[in-house]
Amino acid sequence: MTSGDVGPIPSTWFLPGARAAPEVLESQVARAAASPLVDALLRAWSGAVAVLNGDRQIVALNATSLDVLGVDDPAAVLGLRLGEAIGCDRAQDHPGGCGTGRACAGCGAALSILAAMARDRPEERDCVLTVRRGGEPQDLAFRARASPLELAGERLVVLALADVSAERRRAALERAFVHDLADLVVGLSGACASLGERTPGALPEATGELQALCTRLVREVQVQRALISARPGHLPVTLERVSAEALLDPLRALFAHHPAAAGKCLRVAPAPAGLTLETDPFLLQRVLTNMLVNAFEAAPARGEVRLEVAPAPGGARFQVWNAGAIPAAAATRVFQRFFSTKAESGRGHGTFVMRLFGERCLGGRISFTSTLEGGTTFTLEVPLAFSGAERAPLHPAA
């Protein structure tokens, strides 16, 4: 399940690509503009709302929609589809435009429109998309509600969008606090409490443990501060010379009791002798931890997860494998912020963080392959000697 497919391009990967003829579209726009019902709907809704024709083209929208789309002139977006109007980075994946690409089968807005038209009732879905703002990619999360509307004998769709990006970032922070920061605080508290019980000779070791916990806590706070923003920036990178085996040892210990690994098996291949890196161990282990959690959650009951590291040209290659396969609708959105196939609040950051830290912070490259026969392998390649000059914009999602 990779992007290397060959062969003729199908007419669509998901929704039809046909559009209304120009004269038909002009008539639809005119009728919507003259309709008291449409006018009332657009004025009554406090958020962004647009009216779409049967080909999912915008025929009317309110002022809030213009703000969300980042345009001043309604005429600039009339006739476009939502993804084209908002600048979704997947809108041009297929010649048919928004709704016809591979990734569109996982788009909440497209699914809500399709369901509303098929069932003749309002339908809601989560919609996650990536847009370009100021030349930088920005991930947005919306709650999309599509409602069928009949106007002059023609079936239309009223699409309302509520921006829940800030809510999703807050939920991710709360989840991180419960699962990561809280454990560190408990460990720090325990280490402080035990100081009084140590013999004078054991105090240097105890203070070293305390310092290590404090350092981890500071780094974790830096991570969460970066992730809570709409556009996560660079994190401070603390370079150390570390062996590949030393990077793997804490992961073996962590997943011996990690909830995600319960009832499953982790096999870690020994690292090649002499393989060392100049990198940030904290951030690299954070990426590998997310890769392993992701693999354990996807692995079947009593399944196996494998972690191995090997030399790569100019660097080291870390690979995590499990027997599960990523669904086709999700494969194109794996690294997209907020996107998740799981319903729990705060999800949709694990793979995004893998890519953010692995590529932007560590100067590496993360990718994956997934097939029903061979399972799923996530790969992280990082340089042996990293410098800040190697940082580059994030690679496009797979």
Image (cartoon, rainbow, N blue to C red):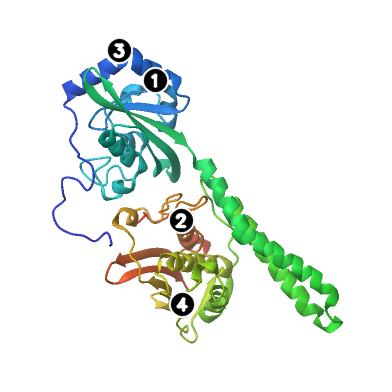
The CA distance from mark 1 to mark 2 is 37 Å
Q: Which residue is mark 3?
A: 34
Classify mark 1: residues with Cα within 10 Å, few (<14), some (14-19) or many (20+).
some
The tag earlier along the polypeptide, 3 or 4, is 3
Residue 268 vs 236, above or below: the answer is below
Q: Secondary structure at mark 3?
A: helix
**Residue type, numbered disc 4:** Cys
Q: Position of residue 389 (x, y in %)?
A: 49, 61
Disc on res. 352:
2
Q: Secondary structure at mark 1?
A: helix
- Whether tag 3 and tag 4 are in contact, CB under 8 A, the answer is no
**Residue type, numbered disc 1:** Leu
Q: Which residue is mark 1?
A: 41
Q: Which residue is mark 4?
A: 265
The CA distance from mark 4 to mark 1 is 55 Å
**Residue type, numbered disc 2:** Phe
The tag earlier along the polypeptide, 4 or 2, is 4
The tag earlier along the polypeptide, 1 or 2, is 1
Residue found 48% across the figure and 57% down from its top: 356
The tag earlier along the polypeptide, 4 or 1, is 1
